[in-house]
Image: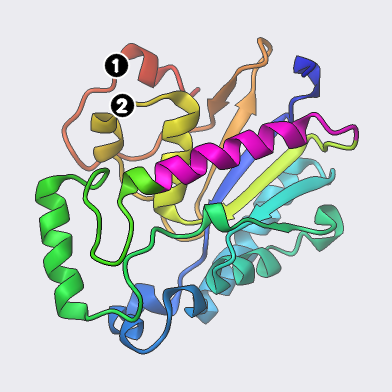
């Protein structure tokens, strides 16, 4: 692929506030993939959409969106339909699978086990580990790079997804260590990270993820952001 054909920007956004962000017991009666946004979540997405429009300079955008309802609603509320065309629903960008209908007490117990075992390697009963999500994100990257080669590939790419998936996408792209990943916080609802193409055709994040644990990134890991 000609390096000059790579997109100028690859933006990632987490879905807006969902009903599950306010009440985790909703998972006991509603499938994770069917949890909707709150009114605030739609407002957050609208604000983010206005900022993304400015970033994209009103130019066309190729969109990949998680099939989860809250992600699709976030995309709708961004208000970028005139730039997007037809978005591609991408199941590999879905939320980490935790279970089917959930037992809240059991999930809370497993979350404690995950904290001691490690967020990357712990696999939820009837669900996935962080490493499972990493693997499917890796296969998505192959698809995305093939799309870069198409003659009509736009200069802007947008991924509408989930917090953990965003962190793992960046971990895979920049080849971060598991220890660094374990120290990172999820972005807030409707928060973005943008990979910006540099003069050498490599990408750098517009800003790093916040860290919640004491880990000093290596020089190579720190080189991932501006």
- Rendered image: mark on residue 218: 1
Of helix, strand and loop, which one carries label 1?
loop
Q: Residues within 10 Å of mark 1 (few under 14, many from 20)?
A: few
Measuring 43% from the left and 17% from the top, which residue is drawn there?
223
Task: Give the image quarter of residue 153.
Answer: top right
Q: How is the image coloured?
A: rainbow
Q: Residues within 10 Å of mark 2 (few under 14, many from 20)?
A: few
- Rendered image: mark on residue 129: none
State the residue lying farthest toward the top.
200
State the residue lying farthest toward the right.
151
Measuring 80% from the left and 23% from the top, which residue is drawn there?
5
Measuring 77% from the left and 19% from the top, which residue is drawn there?
1
> In this rendering, is residue 88 above or below 76?
above
Whether the residues at callouts 2 and 1 have beta carbons within 8 Å, the answer is yes
Task: Compare residues 21 and 140 and report the one nearer the observer.
Answer: 140
Of circles 2 and 1, the one toward us is: 2
Q: Position of residue 133 (x, y in %)?
A: 41, 48
Measuring 29% from the left and 16% from the top, which residue is drawn there?
218
193 relative position to 81: left or right: left
Magenta segment, which residues?
133-151
Of helix, strand and loop, which one carries label 2?
loop
Q: Position of residue 30 (x, y in %)?
A: 41, 85
Q: Is residue 216 magenta?
A: no
Q: Position of residue 102 (x, y in %)?
A: 28, 79
Cα separation, mark 2 vs mark 1, equals 9 Å
Write down the residue under mark 2: 177
36 relative position to 184: left or right: right
């Amino acid at each position: 692929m000609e390096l000059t054909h790579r997109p100028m920007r690859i933006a990632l956004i987490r879905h807006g506030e969902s009903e599950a962000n306010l009440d985790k017991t909703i998972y006991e009666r509603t499938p994770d993939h069917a949890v909707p946004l709150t009114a605030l979540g739609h407002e957050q997405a609208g604000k983010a959409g206005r900022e993304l429009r400015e970033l994209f300079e009103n130019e066309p955008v190729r969109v990949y969106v998680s099939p989860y309802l809250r992600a699709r609603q976030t995309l709708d509320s961004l208000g970028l339909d005139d730039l997007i065309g037809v978005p591609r629903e991408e199941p590999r960008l879905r939320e980490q699978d935790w279970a089917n209908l959930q037992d809240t007490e059991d999930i809370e117990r497993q979350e404690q086990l995950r904290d001691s075992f490690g967020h990357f390697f712990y696999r939820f009963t009837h669900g996935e580990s962080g490493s499972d999500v990493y693997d499917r994100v890796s296969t998505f990257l192959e698809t995305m790079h093939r799309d870069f080669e198409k003659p009509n590939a736009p200069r802007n790419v947008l991924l509408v997804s989930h917090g953990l998936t965003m962190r793992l996408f960046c971990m895979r792209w920049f080849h971060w260590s598991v220890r660094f990943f374990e120290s990172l916080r999820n972005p807030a609802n409707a928060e973005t990270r943008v990979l910006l193409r540099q003069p050498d055709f490599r990408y750098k994040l517009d800003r790093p993820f916040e860290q919640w644990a004491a880990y000093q990134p290596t020089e190579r890991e720190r080189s991932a952001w501006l």
